[in-house]
Image (cartoon, rainbow, N blue to C red):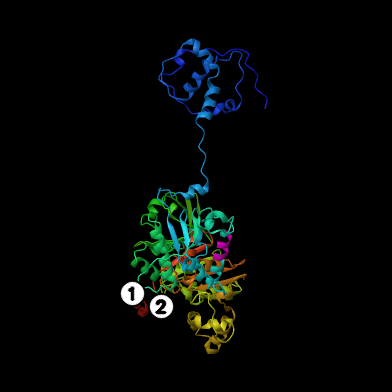
Amino acid sequence: MPLPKAPTKRASRLESNAFETTLTVSKPDPSRKAVAATPAPILAAPPTPALRPKSSPAATSKSTTPAVNAKQAEPVQTTFAPSAVQAARTQAPKPAKPSARKAAAKPANGEATKLFVLDTNVLMHDPMCLFRFEEHDIYLPMITLEEMDGHKKGMTEVARNVRQVSRELDNLAGGLKSSGVEEMAKGLPLDHTGHREAGGKLFFQTELIDAPLPAGLPQGKADNQILAVVQALKLKNPGREVVLVSKDINMRIKARALGLPTEDYRNDKTLEDSDLLYTGVQALPADFWERHGKTMESWQQGGLTFYRISGPLVPSLLVNELVYLEAPGAAPLYAKVLEITGKTAVLRTLKDYGNQKHSVWGVTARNREQNFALNLLMDPDCDFVTLTGTAGTGKTLMTLAAGLSQVLDERRYSEIIVTRVTVPVGEDIGFLPGTEEEKMSPWMGALDDNLEVLARGDSAAGEWGRAATNDLVRSKIKIKSLNFMRGRTFLNKFVIIDEAQNLTPKQMKTLITRAGPGTKIVCLGNLAQIDTPYLTEGSSGLTFAVDRFKGWAHSGHVTLARGERSRLADFASEVL
């Protein structure tokens, strides 16, 4: 860039009142960015060397000297702005931003980092747990690696997780410059493989640890050897907190009995409290019409009424959330949030499936939540539906009726695919004779019971007609095992995942990603009946799916509260 032209005349002399008694550094003027970026022009009469040092401190620091005389004002003015910019650059450089690894290495509260000793079941449960402890360090006892080696073979979910952990450990160990014990004892940076969220180090047991345990604990058991390692680390690092992380409740009880700090692995939990789970239903305030009626727009289309509202209620709504308003003496309002744009939301009234003329394969809604569920199940724009509730709330019956109606009557889907988790999850079906469906039939008793209820409704067809209907229905329902879902793609299918509360988040992801074009997936489950080991209400795959899909325009969720099986079952669920 060429230099600017030299000035043709000297600058005007500053008056004494142009200087303040106290000089302060002002904010840079945006209009002078170009002047500050270009080199200072060479003036005809540069300032004397004796006066140059006085200009830089006066421009960059506070001063309490009175106004200067006229002789000093002229040479100072010629280089005042360039020298101030140069002094600010040389004396007050911008602090360099710390790297991501250094920022993560120090806790925000200034406390020392913890040392977490991982039990084998934590690695088997979550293969990515090595990178979930932020800035803290991880210690793996040698007995943990031995136990992992004994579970790496097979096609179970545990074996897959163990093999993935082994690959992660191998990649971390690949960053070592040498295979010496000294370098291994320094720890392996956990962010070496690209996981920047992990700022700590991984330590392996590199020496024999001899820590005496109480005589009542057998020395040869793996859990007791891990407890001995934790106790030895605690004695070796008195100024650092050493914590055992285990999914085994008995292991944590023994650790607390020995005075060792221990915790459950909590990073797999979507929610700490299941009561905070998204219900999918929200009651409108009693003054809804008074507060939103003035700015409300309404219109009718396709036999349904639409409302566009704006007000304080909009920020609390989610897309596809179901709302209701029931006031004594007034017509109830049952609607679904269709869209949210800025500060406005559009509500659409629901179809009344409680009326017999709107029955779905002979099934009508008996309460408000069942009506909400049938609206989601029959909505072609809703690709993913989750229904939770206690036993007897009608989850399987309504879903099966909606699936048969859309497969046989509306021809929207080609067939129904039903799968459920066999406990233990992911294990072999067993040595039951027959095909895949015949092996799964012992687990599908609930399906048979609901099909019997749906077929009983057609009493006018007679026994032969009901038998023909049952054969037709059976031909449209395929029972699949969870073990053989990996790699499949379902095209134009109505998929029902029963007992989804026993799925892990990884298994839930595997099933949902099987959906192809035109496929609808419905997940059913009761979070109070989890049978899978190491799974809780907060870490269940069903909880994971409900929390992650809330607010998506093509998914919906309803928590069914009232049981409708029988008065005996309802009373038993309350008192037993």
Front-most of residues 204 and 454: 204
Q: Where does the image place residue 175, in percent across and percent down from the top left? A: 58, 56
> The residue under label 2 is which amino acid type?
Arg
The C terminus lies in quadrant? bottom left
Residue neighbourhood size for the residue with mark 2, other residues' Cα within 10 Å, grouped as few (<14), some (14–19), many (≥20): few
Residue neighbourhood size for the residue with mark 1, other residues' Cα within 10 Å, grouped as few (<14), some (14–19), many (≥20): few
**Is label 1 or label 2 in front?**
1
| Secondary-structure class at tag 1 | helix
Image point (58%, 76%), residue name: 408
Front-most of residues 139 and 507: 139
The N terminus lies in quadrant? top right
Tell me, for residue 574, which label it has, or none.
1
Q: Which residues are magenta?
A: 165-171
Q: Quadrant of residue 562?
A: bottom left
> The residue under label 1 is which amino acid type?
Glu
* Residue 67 at least partly seen: yes
Image point (48%, 12%), residue name: 15
Is residue 23 covered in magenta? no
| Contact check, label 1 and label 2, Cβ < 8 Å | no
Q: Which mark is first along the chain, 2 or 1?
A: 2
Main SS, magenta region, reads: helix
Residue position for label 2 = 565
Q: Where does the image place residue 512, in percent across and percent down from the top left? A: 55, 67
Residue 247 in the image: above or below residue 46? below
Q: Where does the image place residue 331, in percent across and percent down from the top left? A: 39, 62
